[in-house]
Image (cartoon, rainbow, N blue to C red):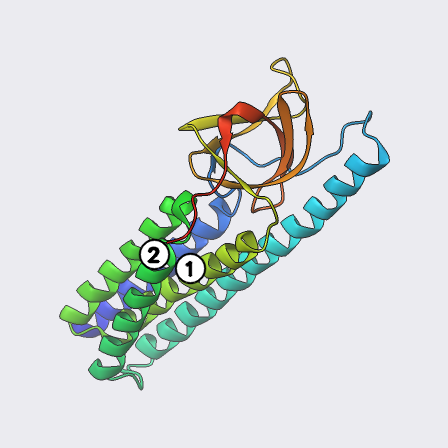
């Protein structure tokens, strides 16, 4: 019975990974809607084309990190399934699970304060930690360690994003609940994405009341400048 429950938990983990891999990372951090990627308009000048070129390189790096994280999750899930099907309990102890869970919670609590625009990912990591706790209470030690490691992987990705954003000179924050990222400096231009409040943006240049900006995931577009604000000083 216990072996069957272990196998079921492992297979559910793999199914969850497959769903996550198919669904993401298709959305921009701090946005709602699909991500068509940074494409420079045909009328762009040399300076603006360079902005789009840098954004595309950053976007590729972002997706490569996400793919590497998903592959690592999948490899761990497959190893867990092999162990369960072979009737092996695994080498992890309850102490290992407790330690992994505690370390992951501390790291997530620390990082969550630095990425307020990524509430969805923070909540996803917290859900993994809650599942790890449930698995440990059911004495499914291997599954508990697995879910704690998944939360840790999400946390590390968020920490990298926070570090990247912290290095942006003169960054701005979205100052309204939802702000349109447009293809050009006009309300008549198509909406590329909807940016959520507190999303950090790298300001590339201004044009009248519009700002050309870059998102943490490397998408480029225009926002109405009065809807942006400066970051609050750190205490």
Viewer-closest of 93 and 30: 30
Of 132 and 197, nearer the camera is 197
At a point 29% along the width and 56% down the height, the residue shown is 126
Going by the picture, which residue comes out furthest to the right?
46
Above or below, 131 relative to 38 = below
Residue highlighted by disc 1: 154
Q: Quadrant of the N terminus?
A: bottom left
Q: Residue at x 27, y 63 (%)?
A: 9
Q: In the rendered view, does 59 fall on the left or right side of 122?
A: right
**Mark identifier at residue 125:** 2
Foreground residue among 2 and 36: 36
Give the number of callouts. Answer: 2
Q: Tell me whether the residue at label 1 lies in contact with that at label 2, contact meaning CB atoms closer than 8 angstroms.
A: yes
Point out residue 125 in the picture as x, y percentages from the top left corner: 34, 56
Where's residue 53, x and y in %?
A: 76, 44
Residue 169 percent coordinates (x, y) = 61, 49
SS for dot 1: helix
Q: CA distance from mark 1 to mark 2?
A: 6 Å
User: Is residue 111 depicted above or below 24 in this figure?
Assistant: below
Q: In the rendered image, which quarter is residue 170 located in?
A: top right
* Pointer 2 local density, CA inside 10 Å: few below 14, some 14–19, many at least 20: many
């Amino acid at each position: 019975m216990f072996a069957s429950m272990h196998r079921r938990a492992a297979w559910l983990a793999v199914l969850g990974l497959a769903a996550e891999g198919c669904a993401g990372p298709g959305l921009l951090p701090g946005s709602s809607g699909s991500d068509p990627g940074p494409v420079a308009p045909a009328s762009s000048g040399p300076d603006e084309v360079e902005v789009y070129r840098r954004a595309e390189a950053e976007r590729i790096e972002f997706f490569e990190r996400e793919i590497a994280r998903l592959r690592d999750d999948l490899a761990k899930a497959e190893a867990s399934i092999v162990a369960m099907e072979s009737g092996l309990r695994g080498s992890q102890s309850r102490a290992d699970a407790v330690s992994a869970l505690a370390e992951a919670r501390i790291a997530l609590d620390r990082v969550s304060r630095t990425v307020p625009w990524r509430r969805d990912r923070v909540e996803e990591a917290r859900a993994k930690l809650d599942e790890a706790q449930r698995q440990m209470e059911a004495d499914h030690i291997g599954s508990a360690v697995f879910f704690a490691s998944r939360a840790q992987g999400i946390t590390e990705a968020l920490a990298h994003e926070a570090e990247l954003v912290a290095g942006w000179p003169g960054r701005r924050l979205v100052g309204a609940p939802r702000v349109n990222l447009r293809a050009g400096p006009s309300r008549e231009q198509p909406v590329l994405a909807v940016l959520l409040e507190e999303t950090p943006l790298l300001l590339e240049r201004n044009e009248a009341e519009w700002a050309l900006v870059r998102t943490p995931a490397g998408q480029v577009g225009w926002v109405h400048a009065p809807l942006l604000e400066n970051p609050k000083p750190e205490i």
